[in-house]
Image (tube, rainbow, N blue to C red):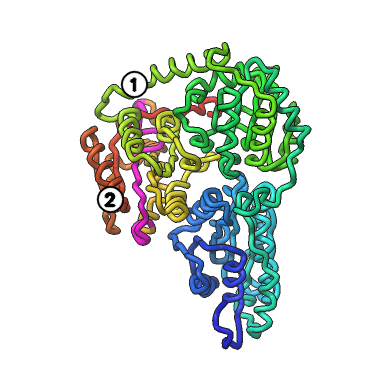
Amino acid sequence: MADARESLVDGNLLAARAFARAGVDHMFGVVGIPVTSFANCSVSEGIRFIAFHNEQSAGYAASAYGYLTGKPGVLLTVSGPGCVHGLAGLSNAMINTWPMVLVSGSSDQADAGKGDFQELDQLAAVKPFAKCAVKATDIRKIPELVSTVVNSCVAGRPGGCYLDLPTDVLHQTLPYGEAADLLEAVQPFVPAWADGDPSGGRTAVSEDKIEAAVAALRGAQRPLVVFGKGAAYARAEKGLRDFVEITGIPFLPTPMGKGLIPDTHPLAATAARSLAIGQADVVLVVGARLNWLLHFGEPPRWSPEVKFILVDVSEEEIELRRPHVGIVGDARLVMEAMVREVKDDPFCLGRSHPWVEKVRAKAEDNVKKMSAGLERVVVPFNFLTPMRIIRDAILSLGSPSPILVSEGANTMDVGRAVLVQTEPRTRLDAGTWGTMGVGLGYCIAAAVAEPKRLVVAVEGDSGFGFSGMEVETVVRYQLPVVVIVFNNGGVYGGDRRNPEDIKGPYKDDPAPTSFVPGAAYHTLMEAFGGKGYLVGTPEELQFALNESFSARRPALINVTIDPYAGAESGRMQHKN
């Protein structure tokens, strides 16, 4: 709290103090009318403000910060178009179920309907993308509503919340004493894994459900454990690993679940994914939804007879899927209970179990096939040759391993198969919504949330283009971020059209998928004082990785890829 000699507190300062009291320590955004003073007040109250060029990138940063830390990621925008741009981050948080708060200034309430500067019914605009949306119509409401959005975004299934701060409310004032009394009502949020509160305020796990789940797995012939970023958010890695190692059941992570148990673990079924999901008869799904990423849990990718055990913090999710066993609860608490249940009456498939041997043999065969492609040096680069060099360079760093940010159709697809995750919450990618443009925002959030880790982005040139200007933000804050751009001249690749097939008055335009060939993305980083590299051979790439990883300063490596190396839609042909 600031000096008690202050006689009046305005809405900007009251809001800043409310957020600080609620436990918010970082804020991301773009300032301007009417929120610049609020941003400055937040800094004075001990909140670090990371200023971006674009609200979309700032919103992606806020959502990823919420995921990595369990704290509400706060995005601040101006009114009207700033709020609209911020919806990208808010909706991303909702779909990925990450805790985030969008705070936007808005027009003067007295001028509503008159065509005020950047006027918009922002409450109506955000409601489809938020768990709750509230508006401070008077300065006295600010502390209560700050407490509401901060606590709502982390409660139950996490998600995005919205707070509207009208211009006139930000300019209203209160006596210091009254403001201090109002701030007493602000409740600091408590993350689910906070020390001293092992339950995180969550309800107790049903022992009957735990017993039923273990009994189903015990009786299975081909059991499988699947886990996702919900388990990562809940810090469930120890329980998951203990359960897998006690029972000997193979496991399959979703992309952002990778690393909860190391990809190198002998029970990892990632390289045998199709076989594992196609033949499993009982599947424990922890912190992952049976959506498109898991083929909806339906045939033909899954067996028609498969039985699912779903663990989710949302009762509505379990009711929607109607699994064989549904367990509502925090993934960490559930897995701890599962481990206790198994220890009381142990069972283990063992390495010689037919199912374990079958999964392992298929995984080893697929790894061997991919290794042949990885070890073959191809210049001009395909996707595999540079990806293998990057993988080896990352693994050589040891622990703590870098946080890997990945986006782009082919780049993300190949990277998911090649780049190895050995520690939890070290992979950020397009996520549940398949969102492109998250890269630089995620990089900045990761560097702020985990300052002891290097952040490495491996992006396609298309994905990079959404947020490339934010390399200036990386340089401005001197964040340990190395951006690697796979430059193949376009979306999926350069112009591959047969000239004889191109007709119409605009036949001389570039293809819809193509960019400027040989774009010098590395010079964008150099323009702001970072280090840029242009590479096209294994030796050049190895040098750039060694130097940039050692320096731990802003760098961009522009990797020239054969424009014919990519394929449309990666592995999503059935959607196109």
Question: Which amino acid is tagged 2?
Answer: Ala
Pointer 1 residue: 373
The relative height of residue 119 versus residue 458 in the rendered view (above or below) is: below
* Secondary structure at numbered mark 1: helix
Pointer 2 residue: 551
Q: Who is closer to the viewer here, 154 or 465?
A: 154
Name the residue rendered at 72%, 28% in the picture: 213
* Secondary structure at numbered mark 2: helix
Name the residue rendered at 52%, 42% in the picture: 435
* Residue 37 coordinates in the image, percent (x, y): 52, 75
Name the residue rendered at 67%, 21% in the picture: 282
Question: Which amino acid is tagged 1?
Answer: Gly
Q: Who is closer to the viewer here, 538 or 206?
A: 206
* Residue 353 coordinates in the image, percent (x, y): 57, 13
The relative height of residue 3 versus residue 154 in the rendered view (above or below) is: below
Quadrant position of the N terminus in the picture: bottom right
Q: Which residues are magenta?
A: 474-500
User: Which comes sooner in the sequence, label 2 or label 1?
Assistant: 1
Quick one: which residue is furthest to the right in this view? 208
570 vs 75, left or right, is: left
Residue 173 appears in which quarter of the rendering? bottom right
* Residue 307 coordinates in the image, percent (x, y): 70, 22
Badge 1 density bin: few <14, some 14–19, many ≥20, Cα 10 Å: few
